[in-house]
Structures are given as C-alpha cells and as structure tokens.
Image (spheres, helix red, strand yellow):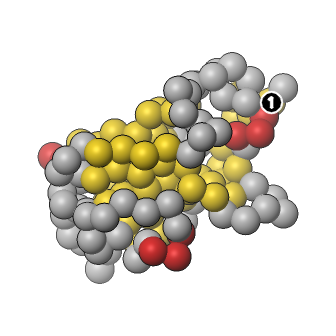
C-alpha cells in the first residue's frame, strides 16, 4: 500500500523559511513524477512544484519560482520542498502527490497518490 506522509509545516513569519518533507512508502518512486500542491481556504488546489526523481527535472509555478526548491533523496524515498522568502499568500495546506508515470504534470487530476497534507501558516 502506497503512503505519502508530509511533515515540516508550521507557523513562520513573512520572509522566513520552512522545509517540507514527503516520505513515500509501499513502493519506490525513483522513476516517477512527484509533486507538491497547496490549497488555501476557499481556493482550489494549485500546483507548486514537481520533480522526476531519476532525471532531477523540476517544474515550478510562477508564483514560487526563485523562492521554492523541490528536491529528492532517492535513498530515503523522500521528496523535499524548501520554501524561502515566504509570503502571507503562501499560507495553505501543502500536499505531496505522486504519479505512476515519470511524466511531470501541473494538473492535480493526473496524480495517483496523495498525502494528508501539512499546514503552512505565514504571519505578516
């Protein structure tokens, strides 16, 4: 059974940093696309970043480019999201997701596995 477990969320002041982790179990995702999405109250879930484990190819939403970095540790079957220069508008529940394929996607509907989410709160 595939499980994705996020951690690392919390409360941070604007301009601060957080690192989210997503530990995968049940299978290895070394050749699969993994992504981070977020959902703020009253808003739709939106794409944040994605990575193909084996190739290290990454994609980012325009709103986080230059501030967020997605990375992975294949040995730990874990994906990270380093978030710097956080803004109040970054506050949301952040979700880790995985695809059965290696093709990256910004569409949440294309992802097959999801974690439970971790809350990120940014105070101004």
- The x, y position of residue 31, in whole percent, is 19, 60
Q: Depth check: 16 or 32 in front?
A: 32
Of all residues shown, which one is farthest toward the top?
Answer: 15
At horizontal 55% and vertical 27% (from top left) the residue drawn is: 67
At horizontal 43% and vertical 63% (from top left) the residue drawn is: 105
Q: How many marks?
A: 1
For residue 26, side relative to residue 7 (left or right):
left
Residue 81 sits above or below residue 50 on the image: above
* Residue 25 seen by the camera: no
- The x, y position of residue 120, in whole percent, is 66, 43
- The x, y position of residue 63, in whole percent, is 64, 39
- The x, y position of residue 50, in whole percent, is 41, 51
Assess disc 1: are there few (<14), some (14-19) or many (≥20) residues with their C-alpha within 10 Å of its C-alpha.
some
Looking at the rendering, in which quadrant would you find the N terminus?
Answer: bottom left
Task: Identify the element where label 1 is drawn.
Answer: strand
Residue 66 sits above or below residue 99 on the image: above
At horizontal 57% and vertical 56% (from top left) the residue drawn is: 47
Residue 5 sits above or below residue 69 on the image: below
Looking at the rendering, in which quadrant would you find the C terminus?
Answer: top right
Q: Depth check: 114 or 107 in front?
A: 107
* Residue 20 seen by the camera: yes
Quadrant of res 34: bottom left
At horizontal 34% and vertical 50% (from top left) the residue drawn is: 51
For residue 6, side relative to residue 62 (left or right):
left
Which residue position is annotated with label 1? 123
């Amino acid at each position: 059974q595939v499980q994705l477990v996020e951690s690392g969320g919390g409360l941070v002041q604007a301009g601060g940093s957080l690192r989210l982790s997503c530990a995968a179990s049940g299978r290895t995702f070394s050749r699969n696309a993994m992504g981070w999405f977020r959902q703020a109250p009253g808003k739709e879930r939106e794409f944040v970043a994605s990575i193909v484990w084996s190739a290290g190819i990454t994609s980012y939403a325009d709103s986080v480019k230059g501030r967020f970095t997605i990375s992975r540790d294949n040995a730990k079957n874990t994906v990270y999201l380093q978030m710097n220069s956080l803004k109040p508008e970054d506050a949301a529940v952040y979700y880790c997701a995985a695809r059965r394929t290696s093709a990256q996607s910004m569409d949440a509907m294309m992802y097959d596995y999801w974690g439970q989410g971790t809350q990120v709160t940014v105070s101004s």
